[in-house]
Amino acid sequence: MARLTALAGGVAATLVLLALPAAAHEHPSGITDLVTPAVVRVEASSHVEITLLDHVGELLHVERSYDIPIGVGTGIVVNPEGAVVTLTRVVKTDKDVAVYAANKIYAEHHKVKIPLDYKRHKLKDALLQHHLKECYPPKTSVSTCIINVTTNVTIFPNVSPADPKGLKADIVKVGAQPDSPAVLIPSGRVVGSVGMPTAPLADKVPDQQGSPTNVAGFTDRPGVNVKETVEIAHLGKGGGGGQDTGRQFSDPEKKVDEPAKLGALTDRGLRGAPVIGDKDGHVIGMLIGGGKDARMIGVREILAALAKAGVAPRRGAIDAAFEAALTRYHTKYYTEAAPGFQRVLELYPGNVVAANLLKTSLQKRGGPEDAGSKQAVAPAPRSMPLWPFIVAAAVLFVVAAAGAFLLWRRRRTSVEKPDQPPPLVAAAAAAAAAAATSSAPTSPPLPLDEGANQTVVVRRSQPFQVVPKQQQVLTAQDQPSVKYCTACGMRLGAAHRFCGYCGHPIET
């Protein structure tokens, strides 16, 4: 019985579980929230320390230092340690900053008009011209200037409150071309106790022409008035987007000149910005070019540059917590999403995206848009109602219980009546009793006494104990000539030696 009951309960539970709706775990199409927390602003400059040995009149040592901008752009954090990938042209320039410093120090010290650029100029004064020429690099034994140049790279993460100083970074690897990926590593502190948010990298670039994408980056340092810029774009013809030519952009409907639109954003600071695939929100490339011709290099070039630099892209604890909360948010389970975003802010207090999504989740929690509250108040409509499964499970349970009870009753009856003869023995006894009756004189049947006392047979209730058969025949009180079988209670004739019904032998 226990086995049948357990089986019925299991079937009922299975039917109920099959009727429940499955929770969604996939992100909706077109999101950029997985990447935007890991987008940073990158600024690079050359720090030039120059000493002018002025011996036109008296020998003087004129010392100056200049910070000359090299480039600005957008970078992508690829591991919790803060490794960033951007473009080589953002952190390296092909212009000679030493020439710029020489022009500037001569213009300031000798009060002459020299354009502040990267060209070598000539002066009308022959002596000053000679000294200026000896100041330009390369350094020789007769140089009039001693120049030392260092490159400073600063990363400004997307945090709130904004970090005015940023994070200093070292250049680990630059590419052979200006639009090749460059790899940076922070040289000092990293925001957050468990590192920084990272961007997931895709496996490859979509091959289909017209595939929708998103481009995200910063036009200035992140702050209260400067948020990340996100723009929609579509992939044009081409392959994976090699660094030599790149993958073009093209609007399938020909309504927008996407290369020119994205080129303007590139010149404003989105150079090196991540191109985010619409399928799962992963980075498929980086924005390059400018002017009216913006293109994209593919994720394979990014992965190859990271491999050469010895930097492994990976995700961290912040990303796991953020992605779990983001899944609940985009499926409109705001009540469940709010604690997840709070956990992200505990791990990374400055996460701007998580803070904004937490604010929205708290506003919509328990409201009409909250799918969690709707499910708690009234079950969502299903294609098939749940009650038929519950009724079927109950019927199965009752049938199994009834079958188990009948089986138990049959076994108990067989134990309580072990003295009943088998059917064949009973049939033989009945035949013998019939033969004896036919040979003996018969007497007319006597009327039954309705007031006669019933014969009571007392047996032991101990299991598996055979009760000995009674050998005496009890008769009615009012009619002493009437006899009854002690086995089945049937009335017997005066000359019967066996019961005509059950074949039990009669002994008087």
Image: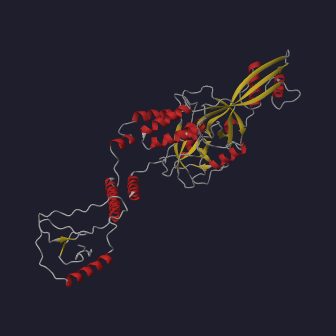
Q: Is residue 227 visible?
A: no
Q: Residue furthest front?
A: 508
Q: Is residue 468 above or below residue 259?
A: below
Quarter holding residue 189: top right
Position of 382 with respect to 38 (left or right) is: left
Measured as percent of width and height from the top left, residue 106 is found at: 77, 22
Q: Which quadrant is home to the C terminus?
A: bottom left
Q: Is residue 261 above or below residue 421?
A: above
Q: Out of 53 and 180, give the one closest to the viewer.
A: 180
Position of 224 with respect to 75 (left or right) is: left
| Colour scheme of the picture | secondary structure
Q: Which quadrant is home to the N terminus?
A: bottom left
Q: Residue at horizontal 31%, vertical 70%?
A: 420
Measured as percent of width and height from the top left, residue 223 is found at: 55, 28
Measured as percent of width and height from the top left, residue 289 is found at: 62, 43
Q: Out of 499 and 81, give the one closest to the viewer.
A: 499
Q: Residue at horizontal 66%, vertical 34%?
A: 71
Position of 47 with respect to 433 (left or right) is: right
Q: Residue at horizontal 72%, vertical 42%?
A: 309
Measured as percent of width and height from the top left, residue 448 is found at: 12, 69
Q: Is residue 67 above or below residue 17?
A: above
Q: Is residue 420 above or below residue 436?
A: above
Q: Residue furthest top?
A: 58
Position of 285 with respect to 360 (left or right) is: right
Q: Residue furthest right?
A: 141
